[in-house]
Image (tube, rainbow, N blue to C red):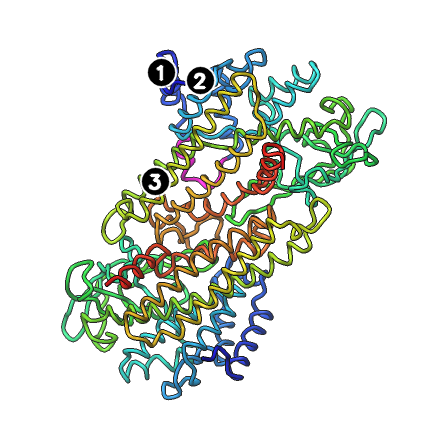
């Protein structure tokens, strides 16, 4: 057991840090003050990473990944969070890609993976349906064979960034007569420009547009667009969800957010003193930091196990639950720190006479919408109730 | 011991509930909050016609002989409908200042037009650096001739975009955080030197930054005694807290009912999600949080007339209960609704946002815990 970075690790950290300092573009640095990130922002950042050879830090070298050790991957995440870079959308890079590597045929791997890597294809996830949320296996979207095509009909929902996407991977029911709902599901790749696919925005309570409804009406895609075996999609779907969960802890980003919170709390006054000197508030920040440390070391232990080839298991549910609770708590405390200036709201209101400009300190602007928005984290990726069920059943054997 | 309402109070509640249901359904409220002017003067007139704006005033003040209990009823029903219109600011707060300390001339001037719906008030007290401290006042009122000259900046003044008049706290003597030296003024928003920057708030209301630049106010618009306004401000804000608690428990009632209904109809794994014990316990916690909030709203409302320390402790205790319960209920309501709870389309998120803002209005949970602790140990 050793907590210290080796000399090579430290040199790597410096290399990443200086790359981010010199190569992270200015127009993305200012994005924090904007309401929403554009598709072009994501593409710009992916291209820069790709050109540096770091397009897919977590992929094996044979697919164009970095081949980094888990320590190096960890350092890279830390440095990106420290520099407050844009996140890379997980749908292609860290959700679909592992599934393709594990289950797709060579032709699919050689076509799709490079296009994820260089940003050619933007992916989104077709999992949840109006009637199939926590109970994902009850999904109803149908794919039927007709000649050399699948014909897909149904509706997916909460499709994050579908309005940016070129492709969507869709869980479809291909055998409605199967004995159990988990059987008879297939994993199919659909170009979102295919006739019959319609993406409709869902506006969330913070006013943002991240998620969508995605409708499929007689959508025809080639039979070869299925990944792996017909009716075995549930296996791949679960494999993906485990990967989704381990990425969901967000430790590095949360550490940065704690720093930001402490900065705000050193400026905001309470009884004329910085609120960080208020013992009640300071205690809450300290508790959060300690929770985050526990999560960080839990994640490190998981990574170490993975590095020994033991693979992410149901323990990744711990990372999902604790990670999202911490992210939510961070936004709660940030909103609390900013006091009365959490209230003004500026997104999308047609104010007359150009009477529309920021009020209060910059860091306060997005605090209430961020608090509202982060409630999603305990719902998505398998709700935290479902994660606790997984721990109870798969880990504890209850 | 009697927690029953009078038949008149029951009638009042029924009237308001009907009005809110008919005129302020969720879609209408959302549409109003997102278009100009952000509220409905016509609805305000209806409030006046129904007598709501005069409900808590004594008959000698031109009101209908009610009390803080009437305001509690109004606010609870308004909370159920997320009513935007500024009853709290106009009737409870401005009305409160006038009831407690208004001169005969001031009452004469303002009460009838509040009750009649012609004048709308906002309460300009918080400042960019004051957080929740009512004594932290940098805005100055300098004595000049037979009046005062106001200079300063008030932050996040709710309902100011709708208001014809402002109640303003300003410093007539002492240092920024002194409790002495605070005075209270009535200032027409149209007075020379008053300017505003208006904006929406996250919970669908409107507020303004209000700037005073050499605003001349006659001495006759000072409410109460110069330099001694702070205890008056505290008393009125405690009444506002009681009213806000009623609004909050009204909001919680709807959220709980909505969430309960959803848990009975939403099916996953072949059964209503309300069948799962983990959700049953959480719905039970939400129910308890609501019941405790109702209790504390009654408690503070009935203790508003007690001596200062008891009244303040009651208000802080109620605000702490409401803050904690509002957070629990709003977060659980979203969680149990799942993705649907996150949408702008459902009312759940709108109640969530209002309860979130109520938590910090007139001091957040921590602020009131500290006030309660200090009073209880002094």
Q: Secondary structure at mark 1?
A: helix
Q: Chain of mark 2?
A: A
Which residues lie in the magenta part? Answer: A28-37
User: Mark 3 sits on what residue?
Assistant: A286
Position above or below: B138 against A206:
below
As drawn, the residue found furthest toward the bottom would be: B60
Tell me the crowding category of disc 2: few under 14, some 14 to 19, or many 20 or more residues within 10 angstroms, Cα based.
many
Residue at coordinates 38% horizontally, 36% vertically from top-left? A290
Dot 3 or dot 1: first in sequence order is 1
Tell me the crowding category of disc 1: few under 14, some 14 to 19, or many 20 or more residues within 10 angstroms, Cα based.
some
Instruction: Residue B143: give its label.
Output: none
Q: Position of residue B68 (x, y in %)?
A: 41, 76
Instruction: Residue A10: give its label.
Output: 1
**On the picture, is A315 further left or further right than A156?**
left
Residue at coordinates 36% horizontally, 52% vertically from top-left? A341
Give the quarter of the figure containing the N terminus of chain B: bottom left
Instruction: Residue A72: give its label.
Output: 2
Q: Position of residue B33 (x, y in %)?
A: 50, 60
Q: Position of residue B296 (x, y in %)?
A: 43, 67
Q: Are marks 3 and 1 on the same chain?
A: yes
Give the quarter of the figure containing the C terminus of chain B: bottom left
| Residue B251 among those drawn in magenta | no
Residue at coordinates 60% horizontally, 17% vertically from top-left? A114
Dot 1 or dot 2: first in sequence order is 1
Cα distance, mark 3 to mark 1? 28 Å
Q: Nearer the viewer, residue B251 or A392?
A: A392
Tell me the crowding category of disc 3: few under 14, some 14 to 19, or many 20 or more residues within 10 angstroms, Cα based.
few
**On the picture, is B186 further left or further right than A396?**
left
């Amino acid at each position: 057991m050793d907590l210290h970075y080796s000399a090579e690790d430290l040199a790597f950290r410096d290399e990443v840090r200086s790359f981010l300092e010199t190569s992270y573009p200015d127009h993305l640095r200012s994005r924090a003050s904007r309401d929403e990130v554009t598709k072009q922002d994501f593409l710009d950042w992916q291209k820069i990473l790709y050109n540096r050879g770091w397009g897919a830090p977590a992929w094996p070298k044979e697919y164009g990944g970095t081949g980094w050790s888990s320590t190096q991957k960890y350092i890279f995440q830390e440095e990106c969070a420290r520099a407050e870079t844009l996140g890379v959308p997980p749908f292609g890079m860290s959700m679909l890609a592992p599934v393709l590597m594990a289950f797709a045929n060579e032709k699919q791997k050689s076509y799709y993976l490079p296009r994820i890597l260089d940003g050619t294809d933007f992916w989104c996830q077709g999992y949840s349906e109006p009637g199939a949320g926590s109970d994902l296996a009850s999904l109803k979207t149908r794919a039927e064979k007709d000649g050399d095509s699948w014909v897909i009909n149904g509706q997916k929902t909460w499709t994050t960034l579908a309005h940016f996407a070129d492709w969507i991977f869709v869980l479809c029911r291909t055998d409605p007569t199967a004995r159990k709902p988990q059987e008879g599901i297939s994993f199919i790749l659909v170009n979102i420009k295919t006739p019959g696919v319609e993406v409709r925005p869902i506006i969330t309570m913070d006013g943002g547009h991240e998620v969508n409804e995605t409708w499929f009406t007689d959508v025809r895609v080639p039979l070869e667009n299925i990944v792996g075996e017909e009716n075995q999609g549930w296996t791949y779907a679960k494999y993906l969800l485990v990967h989704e969960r381990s990425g969901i802890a967000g430790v590095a980003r949360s550490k940065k957010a704690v720093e930001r919170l402490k900065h705000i709390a050193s400026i905001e006054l309470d009884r004329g003193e910085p609120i960080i000197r208020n013992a009640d508030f300071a205690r809450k920040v300290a508790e959060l930091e300690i929770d985050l440390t526990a999560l960080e070391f839990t994640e490190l232990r998981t990574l170490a196990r993975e590095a020994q080839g033991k693979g992410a298991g149901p323990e990744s549910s711990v990372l999902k639950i604790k990670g999202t609770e911490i992210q939510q708590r961070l936004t709660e405390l940030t909103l609390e720190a900013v006091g009365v200036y959490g209230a003004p709201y500026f997104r999308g209101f047609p104010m007359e006479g150009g009477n529309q400009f920021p009020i209060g300190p910059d860091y306060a602007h997005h605090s209430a919408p961020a608090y509202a928005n982060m409630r999603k984290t305990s719902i998505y990726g398998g709700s935290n109730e479902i994660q606790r069920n997984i721990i109870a059943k798969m880990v504890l054997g209850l | 011991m009697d927690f029953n309402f009078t038949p008149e109070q029951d009638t009042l509640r029924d009237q308001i509930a009907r009005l809110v249901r008919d005129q302020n359904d969720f879609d209408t409220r959302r549409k109003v909050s997102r278009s100009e002017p952000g509220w409905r003067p016509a609805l305000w007139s209806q409030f006046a016609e129904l007598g709501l704006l005069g409900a808590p005033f004594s008959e000698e003040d031109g009101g209908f002989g009610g009390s803080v209990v009437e305001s509690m009823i109004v606010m609870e029903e308004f909370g159920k409908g997320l009513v935007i219109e500024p009853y709290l600011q106009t009737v409870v707060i401005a009305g409160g200042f006038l009831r407690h300390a208004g001169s005969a001339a001031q009452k004469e001037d303002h009460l009838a037009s509040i009750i009649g719906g012609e004048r709308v008030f906002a309460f300009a007290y918080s400042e960019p650096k004051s957080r929740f401290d009512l004594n932290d006042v940098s805005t100055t009122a300098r004595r000049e001739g037979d009046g005062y000259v106001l200079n300063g900046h008030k932050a996040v003044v709710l309902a100011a975009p709708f208001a014809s008049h402002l109640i303003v706290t300003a410093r007539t003597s002492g240092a920024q955080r002194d409790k002495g030296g605070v005075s209270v003024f009535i200032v027409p928003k149209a007075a020379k030197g008053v300017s505003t920057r208006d904006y929406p708030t996250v919970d669908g209301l409107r507020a303004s930054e209000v700037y005073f630049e050499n605003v001349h106010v006659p001495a006759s618009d000072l409410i109460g005694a110069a330099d001694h306004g702070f205890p008056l401000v505290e008393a009125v804000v405690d009444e506002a807290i009681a009213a806000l608690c009623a609004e909050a428990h009204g909001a919680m009632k709807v959220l709980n009912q909505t969430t309960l209904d959803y848990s009975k109809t939403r099916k996953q794994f072949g059964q209503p999600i309300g069948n799962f014990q983990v959700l049953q316990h959480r719905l039970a916690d939400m129910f308890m949080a609501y019941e405790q909030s109702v209790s504390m709203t009654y408690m503070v409302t009935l203790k508003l007339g007690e001596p200062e320390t008891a009244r303040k402790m009651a208000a802080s205790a109620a605000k702490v209960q409401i803050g904690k319960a509002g957070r629990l209920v709003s977060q659980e309501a979203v969680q149990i609704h799942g993705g649907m709870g996150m949408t702008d389309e459902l009312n759940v998120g709108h109640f969530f946002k209002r309860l979130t803002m109520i938590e910090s209005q007139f001091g957040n949970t921590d602020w009131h815990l500290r006030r309660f602790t200090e009073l209880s140990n002094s």
